[in-house]
Image: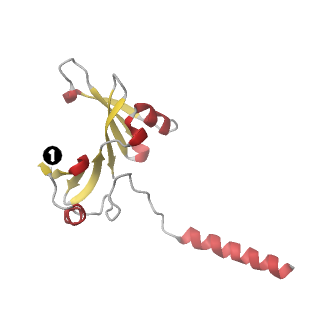
Amino acid sequence: MYKIILFFLIFSIFGCGIKANRPFNKSKPPGFPVNLEMGTSTIEEIKNEMGEPDLSYDVKGEASVVNYNDNLSFKIDKGVAKAFFRDPIKDELTLQYWLQKWKDKKTKKETIPESQNAHGQLDYQLICEDENTTIIYNNENGVVKRVMYYE
């Protein structure tokens, strides 16, 4: 009887030790290509995975944005993917979803002055630095327009 208990005890200790030594596998944002990694994948790797972009343009400094069908975009800085942008999916379409998801996290709300429409309405961004995520939304109706993940 003691041998059986000892066997299970040793098995449990080794099983826990193996799990503890596994490298941490950070989850990827929804919609992010499986074979790519934020912060390490190069523009060449993105093109190999996704094909030629539908649109590409330069932004501040050495950065550029490449846009693919389904409105998926990557911000490339010094040849490496630093951010990923996409349209919201399913429940993510509502501001309420994000407020609930981040209820225990520190967030900050900022206006986007250049988004002002003919009626004077502005878009806003809700930033959760803990999750390296920002959403762009319409404050009037709570509809989320864009989800952005960054390194």
Image quarter for residue 142? top left
Image quarter for residue 52? bottom left
On the rendered structure, is 32 left or right of 97? Answer: left
Q: Residue at x 17, y 20 (%)?
A: 118
The colour scheme is: secondary structure
Residue 31 higher or lower than 21, as above or below: above
The quarter of the image holding the N terminus is: bottom right
Spot occupied by residue 15 in the image (x, y as percentages of width and height): 64, 73
**Residue found at the very far right of the displayed protein:** 1
Give the residue type that dot 1 points to.
Val
On the rendered structure, is 36 left or right of 99? Answer: left
Tag 1 residue: 59
Q: What element carries label 1?
A: loop
Q: Which residue is drawn at 48% across and 39% down?
A: 101
Spot occupied by residue 84 in the image (x, y as percentages of width and height): 29, 50
Residue 81 higher or lower than 15, as above or below: above
**Residue found at the very far top of the displayed protein:** 119
Mark 1 Cα-neighbour bin, 10 Å: few <14, some 14–19, many ≥20: few
Image quarter for residue 107? top left
Spot occupied by residue 19 in the image (x, y as percentages of width and height): 58, 69
Spot occupied by residue 88 in the image (x, y as percentages of width and height): 34, 41
